[in-house]
Amino acid sequence: MDIAALILVIVGALNWGLISLFQFDLVAWLGGGQTAFLSRIIYGLVALAGLWCITLLFKHGQNTDTDVQHRPAT
């Protein structure tokens, strides 16, 4: 879930970069306009992914089962 959220946040960031540099909204272009149903779904998913990524700020430094470093037995 974290990876999917990060990908969507990156897509959103790149889209905002395109808007700022070239006044080109890639999501609207792909989705049929800013108010088109598909575009609104994509914008909504990017927003939800951004909210999900807030949780990643609080996971930083916490050990999970996949993050635990295994030390050799002494």
Image (spheres, helix red, strand yellow):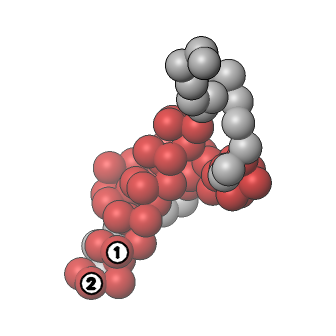
Residue drawn at (50%, 37%) of the image: 3
| Mark 2: amino acid | Leu
User: What amino acid does circle 1 point to?
Assistant: Gly
Q: Quadrant of the C terminus?
A: top right
* Residue to which mark 2 is pinned: 21
Q: Is residue 19 above or below residue 49?
A: below
Numbered circle sitting on residue 17: 1
* Distance in Å between CA atoms under marks 1 and 2: 6 Å
- Image quadrant where one finds the N terminus: top right
Q: Looking at the picture, how far across and down is residue 20, in whole percent? A: 35, 84
Q: Nearer the viewer, residue 46 or 66?
A: 66
Picture quadrant of residue 10: bottom left
- Residue contact at pointers 1 and 2, CB within 8 angstroms: yes
Q: Quadrant of residue 21?
A: bottom left
Q: Residue at x 75, y 54 (%)?
A: 58
Label 2: few (<14), some (14–19) or many (≥20) C-alpha neighbours in 10 Å: few
Observer able to see residue 71: yes
Rendering coords of residue 38 (x, y %) = 49, 43
Left/right of residue 29 with respect to residue 71 in the rendered view: left
Query: Looking at the rendered structure, which numbered label has been put on residue 59?
Result: none
Residue in the image at 66% along x and 52% along y = 60
Does 16 appear above or below 38?
Answer: below
- For this orientation, the residue located farthest to the top is 73
Query: In front: 24, or 63?
Result: 63
Give x and y (percent) for residue 42: 52, 47
From the viewer's perspective, tell me whether residue 65 is left or right of residue 73. Answer: right
Q: Is residue 33 visible?
A: no
Q: Residue furthest left?
A: 22
Residue 2 percent across, percent down from the top left? 58, 37
Instruction: Tell me the element at label 1.
Output: helix
Q: Tell whether 66 sits left or right of 29.
A: right
